[in-house]
Image: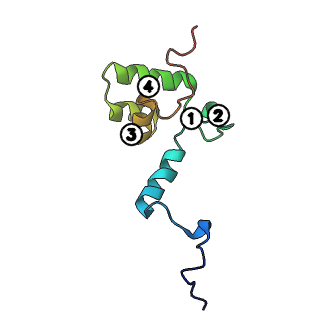
Amino acid sequence: MHTPTTAEPIPARLVNVLPATDRAQEIMRSAFRESPRPPSAGTRNSQAKLTERKVLAIRRAADLGASLSALAGAFDISERACRHIARRTSWAHLPEEGPTR
């Protein structure tokens, strides 16, 4: 096996600038950066359990103090999914006020 000498530069792709934990955090953050709406967001996703009206209802109820576990049970979703909807980290493409009808 060849051992590089001090005169040979280390290729940039082999140099790890960040420690492993910082690299992992950066990868996780990149998923939540501002990006265009994915083609399968919201009701365009064939696996979506909720509609936009249901998501807006969850947000309104959570803002008024409803229990997330009760909302999750009522809409047959996980409490975690309900929490992300209430915090607006999922279904973020929806406007705050929602459609006016």
Residue receiving disc 1: 34
For the residues labelled 4 and 2, say whether their Cβ atoms are less than 8 Å apart.
no
Residue that mark 3 sits on: 79
User: Sequence order check: which comes first, mark 3 or mark 4?
Assistant: 4
From the top left corner, tell me how far across and down residue 4 is, in percent.
57, 84
Question: Of circles 1 and 4, which is in front?
Answer: 1
Q: Secondary structure at mark 4?
A: helix
Q: Quadrant of residue 35?
A: top right
Give above or below for 27 relative to 75.
below
* Disc 2, SS: loop
Q: Which label lies toward us, 3 or 1?
A: 1
Residue 57 on image: x %, y %: 46, 21
The relative height of residue 99 versus residue 62 in the rendered view (above or below) is above
Amino acid type for the residue under numbered disc 2: Pro
Viewer-side label of 4, 2: 2
27 horizontally vs 42: left or right: left
Give the labeled residue for mark 2. Answer: 36
Element on which disc 3 rests: helix
- The residue under the point 43% across, 56% down is 22
Please tell me which of labels 1 and 4 falls first in the chain: 1
Q: Look at mark 4 in the image and give the residue it sits on.
A: 58
Q: Residue at x 38, y 39 (%)?
A: 79
Observer-side mark, 2 or 3, equals: 2
Residue 75 shown left or right of residue 41 in the figure: left
Q: Nearer the viewer, residue 3 or 79?
A: 3
Residue type of the residue flagged with mark 3: Glu
* Label 1 – label 4 distance at C-alpha: 24 Å
Mark 2 crowdedness (10 Å alpha carbons): few <14, some 14-19, many ≥20 = few
Q: Tell me which numbered mark, 3 or 1, is placed earlier along the sequence.
A: 1
The residue nearer to you, when weighing 101 against 19, is 19
Count of marks placed on residues? 4
